[in-house]
Amino acid sequence: MTDAAPKVAKPHHAGHRERLRERARGGGLTHLPDYELLELFLFRSQPQGDVKPVAKALLARFGSLSAVLAASVEDLMTVRAEDSKGRMKGVGAETALDLTALHEVSRRVVREPAARRPVISSWTALVSYVRVALQHEPREQFRVLYLDRK
């Protein structure tokens, strides 16, 4: 008989961050589901612990990745989820600020080409502009667009 110590099973999330990063590096970000893309971002603001439950809770609460990013800091901070150890984790002020900053970055990236163009020259470009400008505004807005046939 041997006196070998019994093996303790590792938690299912052990090494998850590195596995997810490797998948992102190897296959690209476009193939990741929204919750995993959100996890990659949450790794930065929550350097330890399992963030998958928080990422999934954010998507469940707001309905889509774009809605998560468009949510207010206050609304983001109401999200809570139970981690793999049964502890409640949530979105703190810094994480909420990071997510809202990412939303503003994405808005500016999309808006930049339109700002350099003097004219919106097609119906598709007009619809795209209006969607970006108004899609996640918390209040109804009234805007005037001056259009001509050119």
Image: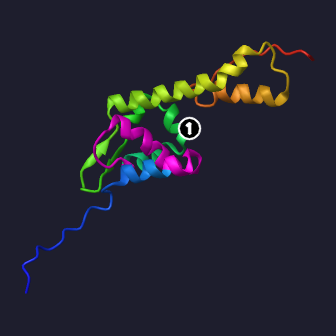
Asked whether residue 35 is in view, the answer is: no
- The residue depicted at 11 percent of the width and 73 percent of the height is 5
Badge 1 is on which residue? 66
Amino acid on which disc 1 is placed: Ser
Is 121 on the left-hand or right-hand side of 25? right
Considering depth in this image, is 23 or 83 the residue closer to the camera?
Answer: 23
Q: Secondary structure at mark 1?
A: helix
The answer to whether 42 is drawn above or below residue 125 in the figure is below
Quadrant containing the N terminus in the rendered view:
bottom left
Residue farthest toward the right in the current orientation of the protein: 149
Asked if residue 57 can be seen in this view, the reply is yes
In this view, the residue in front, 15 or 137, is: 15
Q: Which residues are magenta?
A: 24-53
Against 16, residue 135 (above or below) is: above
For the point 49% across and 29% down, which residue is it? 102
Residue drawn at (14%, 74%) of the image: 6
Q: Quadrant location of residue 86?
A: bottom left
Q: Give the camera-side residue of 117 and 79.
A: 117
Spot occupied by residue 3 in the image (x, y as percentages of width and height): 6, 79
Q: How is the image coloured?
A: rainbow
Q: Position of residue 128 (x, y in %)?
A: 73, 30
Check disc 1: other Cα within 10 Å, few if <14, some if 14-19, many if 20+: some
Chief secondary structure of the magenta span?
A: helix
Image quarter of residue 96: top left
How far from the left and from the top, in percent, is residue 67? 54, 37
Asked whether residue 16 is drawn in magenta, I would say no
